[in-house]
Image: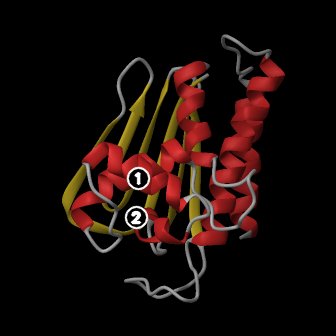
Amino acid sequence: MAMASETLREVISLAASAAVIGVGQDPLSQFRTFLTAIGEALNNTSDHAYPQDLDTKLPNIGRWWITGAVDPATRRLTFSVYDQGVTIPRAIPYGRRRDEVQRFMQKLIRRGYDADDTSLDGHAIAAAVRVGVSGTGHSYRGHGLGLMRDYIKAYRPGRLRIISRNGEFMACTGRKDEFKTRSVALHGTFVEWTVDL
């Protein structure tokens, strides 16, 4: 994981030098929100992607992969992370806020959530982003994806794309969130966050 730490430090350094400035908060507060979102997403991946009591389609290796890039010409940062873990839809029933997710799903689809029903995976990811799901029991955890979404909605133009099992979720600045379920599964979770600096 040392390589991932170095890569993350480089991405953070480039983003800091690009002077993330937007509306509503001072630049330092916005940058803290930016870093908190990345850190929380990575913590959730390392804490919850590979629980010992749930099977994954791929070998449980307990690792994740991260990459990032800044395009100086467009002043756009892209941050991506992937894990081969249990997936967001599969992990929801074990999350601290599973009852809130169930209520959100009930409102969305008029029935409860079943983690084995892959036809609801897009809905499940949308619920996880909106409600914030963490299995730690700590109220300050489980908000990374929601913070990423809120950041591009409130401060800087961008896009958040999440693919997990058969579900896909997309949030873009100035547009309504979209989610869908695909016929082919991704074994794990892929998150791509693009922010215009």
The image quadrant of residue 6 is bottom right
Question: What residue sits right under mark 2 in the picture?
Answer: 89
- Above or below 93: residue 40: above
Question: Which residue is nearer to you in this view: 56 or 92?
Answer: 92
Q: Is residue 99 left or right of residue 14?
A: left
Q: Determine whether label 2 and label 1 are within 8 Å by CB.
A: yes
- Above or below 21: residue 57: below
Q: Is residue 3 left or right of residue 94?
A: right
- Count all numbered tags in the image, as a single digit: 2
Question: Which residue is nearer to you in this view: 81 or 152?
Answer: 152
The amino acid marked with disc number 2 is Pro
Question: Which residue is nearer to you in this view: 87 or 97?
Answer: 97
Q: Residue furthest right?
A: 28
Describe the element under mark 2 as helix, strand or loop.
helix
Residue 24 image position (x, y, % from top left): 70, 12
Q: Residue at x 60, y 75 (%)?
A: 63
Q: Residue at x 50, y 46 (%)?
A: 129
Q: Is residue 111 left or right of residue 140?
A: left
The amino acid marked with disc number 1 is Ile
Q: Residues within 10 Å of mark 2 (few under 14, many from 20)?
A: many
Question: What residue sits right under mark 1 in the picture?
Answer: 125
Image quadrant containing the C terminus? top right
Coloration of the structure image: secondary structure
